Image (cartoon, helix red, strand yellow):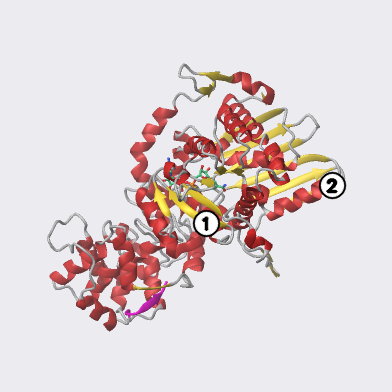
Amino acid sequence: MTKEAQKPVVKVAVIGLGRAGHFHLQSITDLPQAVKLTWVIDVDKEKAQRIAAERGCNWSDQLDEALKGPDAVDAVVIASATDTHFPYIMQALRADKAVLAEKPISHELHEVEEAVELAKTKNLAFVCGYQRRADRHFRELKRQLDAGAIGNLKLLKTCSRDNPIPPMEYLRTSGGIFHDMLIHDFDMLDFLSGGQVPESVTATGHSYHPEIEAMGDVDICAVMFKYASGLIAMVDTCRNASYGYDQRIEAFGERGMLTAKNELTSTVELAKADGHRMPSALYSFPQRYVQAYKSELTEFIELVQAGRDSELHRLEQKAMLRHPNVVRTTIAAEMSWKQGNTMEIAKVDSLLTRTPDGAVATKVDDMQRPEKLRRLDIVEEMLSKYEKHCMQTVAFVKEQHERWLKFDKGELSVFEALQILSDLGDRRGLQAAERCRGQGAPDWLQLVALIHDLGKVMALPQLAGKDLLDEWAVLGDSFPVGCAPDMVGLPDSKKNLDHSHPLYGTKNGIYQSGCGISNLMMSWGKDEYIYHMLKFNKCTLPAEALNTIRLQSFSLWHEKGAYSQFEATEDAETLKWVKELNQMCRSDRTGDDQPAGFGQADWMVELLKKYNMDGKLKW
Ligand SMILES: NC(=O)c1ccc[n+]([C@@H]2O[C@H](COP(=O)([O-])OP(=O)(O)OC[C@H]3O[C@@H](n4cnc5c(N)ncnc54)[C@H](O)[C@@H]3O)[C@@H](O)[C@H]2O)c1
């Protein structure tokens, strides 16, 4: 038996199964010898149940059960919404469990102090998910810095620009850009400066995004710190960088400079007579920090395995004290932005005040916030549309082609894909197909109705894996990219970067008048995917069937007559069938034609065979 195999397997519960929950689940999958996923927990019971079934573990919508009984865990990974971190941390620590909590521990300094105090008193492993500390590039920069490569450190610069803009629903409970994003940079400053606490901070910011402004938050920020040692640190951050995820660090010292450049999709640079072309940036944090998330979890598990008497544990207990420092710095930076002046870090504690119910609040709280949040609820329905129209650019669509049109995600039969959607309560395809058949529609339209929604699998982790897409990139209306929007009655989408592009922002953009609707590059979503998937798998559906699938959600065209400058004669046929399909798919129909369960009717099997879609297809 190897030494590795003798280490105890750590039983783990993961709380919160969203974006962060998924990267932790992935890291757990990568450590089969050391970790046993025993519980998954989410307030979204269906999600918890589904993921538990996929992973073969227990599920719950609360933590209690995972802490006791035969399947009790040794450690808890907390990746739920930010405002739930502190109560879960305390519950897990009180039950003597080791904790890896996503950042931030809490926005409240006294809660962070309480959590650290409890972890120390109980002598338990308590790690916060500042994964940049585990990133190989930043670690190498730190190693050289500590080895004296640039001598005395004079200036630190960190840059972190997110992509894509997070869902508005997420931002509403994120605690704002200071506690949600900048705290990562402030933790890096602590890491790189060797735990120095700044003396003062000056921050400024602006909101370009109306919904973020309505939350009382900003989407771009610059923060400057001054330290007693003379060190100056500068941080710039932004919620959305058009060119992809951007994370850089520069350390300037008396004998040189260390730079950690942004990580790109490859290291290959193309040089030609007209210039040099670099590869694109990585898409977002799950791609950029995949190694760091795994190292972070591996090190946490090693810490738990090492035991409470180990040197590793003793060092981590000592290092835990940085958490209140980083949160104090964050609060000071947020105060500086709100008040528009330089804040002395030492004054922060005296500026925190107790409210009558005992909670601690900053004196500079934005009292309008609740009202602004209510306003946001009203427009929420519009947001996914808004988000989609902002985010779908030529570059984004090309990137999705790159990710999805290789069809290397797995193999599924049409019935297996239908079963997945059916298990999630989505039987629209089956219902629409039955209606088509009942009304004597052509057999290919019956089949199109059956499969018209299967592209939704792009939003399912079991198929999408690392390329999992948010809803706005899978569902909703479609429209062409590469030309100016012709969006009657839709929210303003001026934030779409292509709209200020010299070519993509013009009426015809990259197309010619009369080029044909089916020749447009459509926004990325379920229809585009299923259209290409059918072609890739050499199904023999007629062209009008494929065009109908592809353009089914382009309601700006088929309902509102927009983009008519691109129409060609042959589009009239597609238009007729798209309208027919939409009529059949309308969910407001009541009727007894809706199948109660999911069965593979013989006629479906026959049609799949006829159009070469039986058996497994590549997705
Ligand atoms: N370290 C990083 O790089 C990183 C990246 C993304 C998010 N995060 C952090 O992870 C946390 C989650 O962010 P996300 O992007 O995954 O959000 P998300 O909205 O995608 O997922 C949050 C999940 O938590 C669940 N949840 C909410 N309240 C819960 C509760 N009381 N109990 C159990 N489950 C609950 C939700 O149903 C959802 O499934 C945030 O605090 C965020 O700051 C960290």
Residue in the image at 66% along x and 38% along y: 186
- Quick check: 210 left or right of 120? left
Q: In the rendered image, which residue does mark 1 sit on?
A: 36
Of badges 2 and 1, nearer the viewer stands 1
Q: Looking at the picture, does residue 146 appear above or below residue 51?
A: above
Q: Looking at the picture, does residue 136 appear above or below residue 268?
A: above
Q: Looking at the picture, does residue 449 appear above or below residue 163?
A: below
Secondary structure, mark 1, is strand
Secondary structure, mark 2, is loop
Label 2 CA crowd tier, 10 Å (few <14, some 14–19, many 20+): some
Q: Nearer the viewer, residue 576 or 201?
A: 201
Question: What amino acid does circle 2 point to?
Answer: Ile
- Quick check: 602 left or right of 64? left
Q: In the rendered image, which residue does mark 2 sit on?
A: 150
In magenta, the rendered stretch is: 613-619
Residue in the image at 67% along x and 35% along y: 322
Query: Residue 418 at what x, y percent from top left?
Result: 30, 67
Residue in the image at 50% along x and 22% along y: 359
Let me know if residue 614 is in the magenta part: yes
Label 1 CA crowd tier, 10 Å (few <14, some 14–19, many 20+): some
Question: What amino acid does circle 1 point to?
Answer: Lys
The N terminus lies in quadrant: bottom right
- Mark yes or no: residue 597 visible: yes
Let me know if residue 364 is in the magenta part: no
Query: Residue 226 at what x, y percent from top left?
Result: 74, 31
Q: Nearer the viewer, residue 217 or 517?
A: 217
